[in-house]
Image (cartoon, helix red, strand yellow):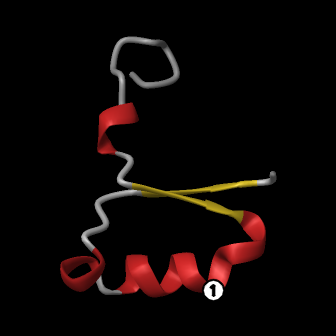
Amino acid sequence: MVEAGQLDAGHLITHRFALDDVTQAYGVFADPVRGGALKAVLTRT
């Protein structure tokens, strides 16, 4: 549904990290209660 454009999942993304920060991203996502993460996105830039 997301790929077809029928569902906008953008509001579910709570955190964005550069790929270089993958360790920090994992720490936040591994403990969602403390980190407040619902969905985290890694970007190449």
Q: Tag 1's secondary structure?
A: helix
Residue 16 lies, in percent from the top left, at 53, 56
Q: Position of residue 17 (x, y in %)?
A: 60, 62
Compared with 8, 32 (above or below) is below
- Rendered location of residue 4, percent (x, y): 49, 13
Q: Residues within 10 Å of mark 1 (few under 14, many from 20)?
A: few
- Give the side of residue 32 with respect to residue 43, left or right: left
Q: Residue at x 74, y 66 (%)?
A: 19
Say which amino acid is labelled 1: Thr
Q: Position of residue 8 (x, y in %)?
A: 36, 23
30 displayed left or right of 22: left
Q: Residue at x 52, y 22 (%)?
A: 3
Q: Which residue is mark 1?
A: 23
Total label count? 1
Q: Quadrant of residue 21?
A: bottom right
In the rendered structure, the answer to whether residue 36 lies left or right of residue 42 reads: left
Residue at 47% across / 87% down in the picture?
27
The quadrant of the image that shows the N terminus is: top left
44 relative to 35, above or below: above
Left or right: 34 in relation to 27:
left
Residue 39 falls in which quadrant of the image?
Answer: bottom left
* Residue at image point 40% right, 76% down: 29
Image height of 21 relative to 2, above or below: below
**As rendered, which of 2 and 33 lies closer to the eye?**
33
